[in-house]
Amino acid sequence: EKAGYDYFMLKEIAEQPKAVADTLLGRIDASGRLTLDEVRIDAHALREIDKIVIVACGTAFHAGMIAKYAIEHWTRIPCETELASEFRYRDPILDPRTLVVAISQSGETMDTLMALRHAREQGSKVLAICNTNGSTIPRESDAVLYTHAGPEVAVASTKAFLTQLVACYLVALYLGQVRGTKWGDEVSSVVRELSDIAKQVDQVLETMEPVRELARSLKDKNTVLFLGRHVGYPVALEGALKLKELAYMHAEGFAAGELKHGPIALVEDDLPVVVVVPSPRGRSVLHDKIVSNIQEIRARGARTIVIAEEGDETVVPYADHLIRIPATPTLLQPLVATVPLQVFACELATARGNEVDQPRNLAKSVTVE
Ligand code: M6R
């Protein structure tokens, strides 16, 4: 059932273009309109929402962090993303005009389930983004948007993450459509690029050999740091989480802007630091800032592993290793930028002799609080 792959994780990484395409299927029509009638929250209720709260754990939480950037930008509805395990215990402010979005691959994560129960008790509507038909979280929610990743067996989440992102983008764009957005032209072009994104994910997968080689060369390192800004920040957190889970290495993700507020003290000679560089188009200020961050850490001896768009030449002089990803709109970049980090962690785990599909101490679905 591993279809010739050594591990389910490798198979699931390879299945990502299809998972992404399947999750988009039938949800964008030929004219670029989003058709999410299946979600069954009526347009009137969606127009009344004045706040969105996303709750999730682990990798799904990282998808939720990225969703916040997309939702606030395209819809101007205030959105916060919170770890499900923290949410319920701090007496959050919720009412019927709050839409709570619960993201879960398994649909059985107890922390997320308890958070959504709490939200419904306060009168909020809950939309589940879930990969498992008929599981508890969608059953207990007011509405559900299924991701179509297919069964994910490896404990480390890969294809489910990409499809969670797709579902979040669809929700954000749909809300923009229902409520009106001032970014009409940008939204139409993003919808077009999103419809085609599976090809770019495929393109990334075809260029992963140097990433594997790099991973193997780092197998005796103790620490790897990950930096990103904007949507690259949750991508950095996801890269670090994958490495902890699979390679049992100390890995930390930081918002690049926070470097000078502390983490830069960690940088020492030959420390591998992965940097996710935002697209230079559209957000050039952010791009320039991260390029200076790369210079700063390199000047202090870091071994820089730079993930940057094709054609972005500004990073070349400061990259000890350069991983190219296709150009995408800024908000969609996590769909391509995360893939090399998955491959990197999987290969490091293998090189360190770890069990890839069943990392120690972890379960695929965490059904206790
Ligand atoms: O099934 P869920 O999406 O609710 O699971 C949430 C987390 O437990 C999960 O994403 C976990 O962090 C993964 N092992 C990460 O690879």
Image (tube, rainbow, N blue to C red):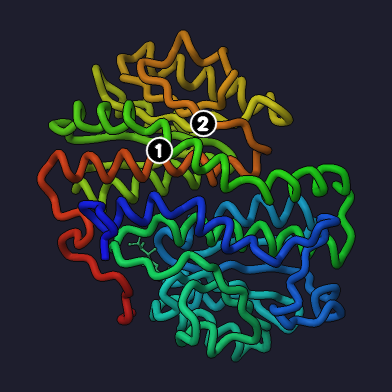
Residue 165: where, in percent of width, then height?
A: 56, 56
Q: Establish if 10 lies above or below 308.
A: below
Q: Quadrant of residue 280?
A: top right
Dot 2 surroundings within 10 Å: few (below 14), some, or many (20 or more)?
many
Circle count? 2
Element under disc 1: helix
Where is residue 323 shown, x and y percent of the image?
43, 26
Which residue is painted at 37% across and 66% down in the image? Answer: 152
Check disc 2 and report the residue beneath it.
325
Q: Residues within 10 Å of mark 1 (few under 14, many from 20)?
A: many
Residue 182 horizontal side relative to residue 212, left or right? right
Res. 20 in view: yes
| Res. 86 visible in picture | no
Residue 7: image x %, image y %?
23, 55
State left or right for residue 315 relative to residue 206: right
* Circle 2: element type: strand
Spatial CA span between label 1 and label 2: 9 Å
Q: Position of residue 317 (x, y in %)?
A: 46, 8
Mark carried by residue 340: 1
The residue shown at (16%, 33%) is: 219
- Label 1 close to label 2 by CB (< 8 Å): yes
Of 17 and 39, nearer the camera is 17
> Label 1 amino acid?
Pro
Query: Which residue corresponds to the image point at 85% horizontal and 73% vertical from the top-left?
Result: 47
Left-right relation of 118 to 77: left
Quadrant position of the C terminus in the picture: bottom left
Q: Quadrant of the N terminus?
A: bottom left
